Amino acid sequence: MASLGLRTLLSSAKAVAKRGGKMVIYSPQPNVIEVLKVSGVSNLIPIKDDLPSALAEVLS
């Protein structure tokens, strides 16, 4: 995942949050999870492996 992709995720999450919503990353590939964790994005945008927990996070 390139830095532009990380920037896009963060700016999208910020825009969604401004409108009162929540963003979740659902079921990314293992190498993408590693990049999200190392970059700190996973601290700002939750990563969920299954649909029920992703939906629960967004709807909470």
Image (cartoon, rainbow, N blue to C red):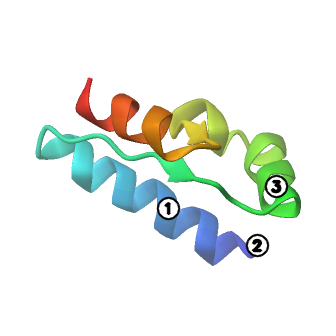
Q: Which residue is mark 3?
A: 35
Amino acid of disc 1: Leu
Q: Residue furthest top?
A: 60
Q: CA distance from mark 2 to mark 1?
A: 11 Å
Amino acid of disc 2: Met
> Residue 16's x, y, as percent?
24, 51
> Residue 32's x, y, as percent?
78, 61
Q: Earlier in the sequence, mark 1 or mark 3?
A: 1
Which image quarter holds the C terminus? top left
Which image quarter holds the N terminus? bottom right
Secondary structure of the residue carrying tag 1 is helix
Left or right: residue 2 versus residue 46 is: right
Question: Which residue appears at 32% of the width and 37% of the height?
Answer: 58
Question: Which residue appears at 45% of the width and 46% of the height?
Answer: 24
Residue 34 drawn above or below residue 29: above
Residue 26 drawn above or below residue 8: above
Q: Residues within 10 Å of mark 2 (few under 14, many from 20)?
A: few
Question: Which residue appears at 44% of the width and 37% of the height?
Answer: 52
To which quarter of the image does residue 11 belong? bottom left
Q: Which mark is residue 1?
A: 2
Secondary structure of the residue carrying tag 3 is helix
Amino acid of disc 3: Val
Q: Which residue is mark 1?
A: 9
Q: Earlier in the sequence, mark 2 or mark 3?
A: 2
Q: CA distance from mark 1 to mark 3?
A: 13 Å
Secondary structure of the residue carrying tag 2 is loop
> Residue 10's x, y, as percent?
47, 55
